[in-house]
Image: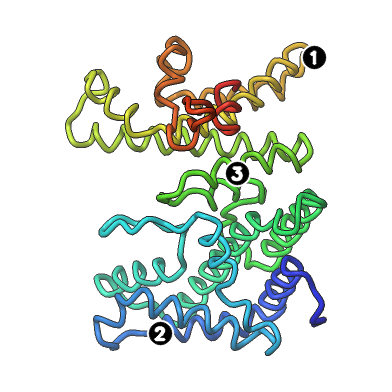
Amino acid sequence: MSPDLAPFEAHIDVLQSFLARRDQIIEQVQGLLNARGRPAHSLRDRPQLSRQFEDLFYSTAVAADRVHLKGKLQEAHWASGFKPRVMPGIPNEMFDPADMIVRAFSLWQHTRWPGRNGRIRYAHTLFNLYLIRCLALLTMRLWDVGTVDASGKLAGIQAFLDQLWKSSPADQPVFVRDVRWLVPVALSPTTDDLGPYFTVAQRIAESLPLDDRLEIHKAIVVMAGGHLRSQLRHFTMQGTSLDEPGLVLSTRRSNALDFAMTIQNLVPLLAAYEKACAGDDHRTRLDLAGAICQGVSADPELFVNRLDLLGPYSMIEHLFIGEEGGKAALTPVGARHVQL
């Protein structure tokens, strides 16, 4: 491996090394899963399992001059403002293979421990999950050296994702086919810093071609709608009726970021839908309409009928409002939001 590779290409190179040595890594992972009889506490130690799991990849497949890249994608993501908030008892990280190992150990302890074939099959699933996690983090590194060739880098990640599924056994689930849907996955954990979400939105708008932007907008809108609906379902499962006025008010007060990000991504989808209607593009209209409806589904009254309230409920004051000449004024991010 050439030592003069740029960071983005270096990470792709490491992922290619993992793929080239898939069988050897799978053998190591199934050995990690062969944990029956170990102390119970070690089967629940997620941080230790996470380190052991990742070490297997790097010790098996990566040359010495690339080992220093271990953990760098996550470190860079956290450094750019996306460090997950500590929420005891509540999962708040992008899917983690170590968490899936802990869950598997718990299930197997209460049922039966799988033999070698079963462990091999699950090892392939964990291998795929780990690489998808890396790809999701890599989508956030498109702009590390500016916006030039962000689309080409995104295409490179897609090409690798295609390779990943071609290398997988036929019985493995295909978790995602379009790498653009990994962008909202990388943005999914709850954080204390909200500004970076809008930074990423601005970079997407300025650096990617229309087709890529629209697919990312659809992914963000659909997943935000799903998140908001799951919140409603949580309350209804506890006995609160959907018709309860307090439920609506409570969810509106706590979802300013989700509402603001939905607006950021709904507007270009609505513009594309209008264009598709004018061009009588029925297939595109259906596709866009599906995403738009999912985006507003958690609170259609707010998004369709009460635009007078949508602005206030989607305002994030410390980001959108600043001071100019001793008076309150919109920041550039706030002005863009108000325009949208």
In what element is the residue under mark 3? helix
Whether residues under marks 3 and 2 lie with C-beta atoms below 8 angstroms apart, the answer is: no
Q: How is the image coloured?
A: rainbow
Q: Earlier in the sequence, mark 3 or mark 2?
A: 2
Indicate which disc residue 279 carries: 1
Q: Quadrant of the N terminus?
A: bottom right
Q: Amino acid at mark 1?
A: Gly
- Residue shown at the point (41%, 66%) measured from the top left: 100
Q: Earlier in the sequence, mark 2 or mark 1?
A: 2
In the rendered image, which residue does mark 2 sit on?
34
**On the rendered structure, is 238 left or right of 117?**
left
Q: CA distance from mark 3 to mark 1?
A: 33 Å
Indicate which disc residue 199 carries: 3
**On the rendered structure, is 201 left or right of 276?**
left
Residue 244 versus residue 257 in the image, above or below: above
Badge 3: how crowded within 10 Å, few (<14), some, or many (20+)?
few
**On the rendered structure, is 237 left or right of 30?**
left
- Image quadrant assignment for residue 301: top left
